[in-house]
Image (cartoon, rainbow, N blue to C red):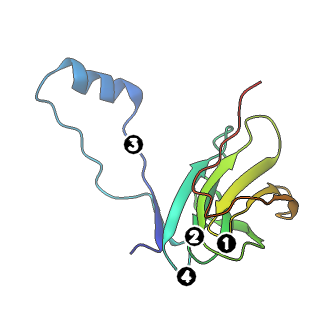
Amino acid sequence: ARRTMKIWELPRREEMQQCVDEEGTELSVEKSSATVLAHSKEVNDVSVSPNNKLIASGGHDKLVRIWRFPQGDMLGECVGHRRGIWCVAFSPVDQVMASASGDHEVRLWNIKDYTAIRSFQGHTSAVLRVCFLAN
């Protein structure tokens, strides 16, 4: 089950606010709206794109996969890391994403064709987190 990715449809904001306003009220989510076998090994991270149309997942199988949100259809994969992926992040402004890996590298990927744009090397151990800074 650690290789799966589940997409949950949460209650609307109004329903959640009502639950907060009325103490003791419970909300429940019956089941996930989509469950996919995302990776052949553990899924270490997921990230939703700024436009809410894509999900990126990074796995211990050395792959970054891009999925259609909220359907969960795989659109493509980014291949090139030599160890598991620990973190994935979408750029807030460009069609680019980044991945951090146990291979001591951070990579930038083109999310139109899933190709590597650049590899940043120089870390002496696994890179566990990556993020983009706002301008």
Q: Is residue 75 above or below residue 55?
A: below
Q: Position of residue 110 (x, y in %)?
A: 84, 55
Q: Quadrant of the C terminus?
A: top right
Q: Nearer the viewer, residue 9 or 80?
A: 80
Q: Is residue 38 above or below residue 96?
A: below
Give the labeled residue for mark 2.
Answer: 59
Within the image, what quadrant is residue 25 found in? top left
Callout 2 environment at 10 Å: few (<14), some (14 to 19), or many (20+)? many
Callout 4 environment at 10 Å: few (<14), some (14 to 19), or many (20+)? some
For label 4, the SS is loop
Q: Is residue 37 left or right of residue 22?
A: right
From mark 4 to mark 2, how far is it between C-alphas?
8 Å
Within the image, what quadrant is residue 73 found in? bottom right
Give the labeled residue for mark 4.
Answer: 40
Q: Is residue 63 visible?
A: yes
For label 3, the SS is loop
Q: Position of residue 79 (x, y in %)?
A: 76, 73
From mark 1 to mark 3, how far is it between C-alphas?
28 Å
Going by the numbered disc 2, the residue's amino acid type is Gly
Give the labeled residue for mark 3.
Answer: 10
Q: Are marks 4 and 2 in contact (CB under 8 Å)?
A: yes
Q: Position of residue 42 (x, y in %)?
A: 48, 73
Going by the numbered disc 1, the residue's amino acid type is Leu
Callout 1 environment at 10 Å: few (<14), some (14 to 19), or many (20+)? many
Earlier in the chain: of badge 2 and badge 3, it is 3
Going by the numbered disc 3, the residue's amino acid type is Leu
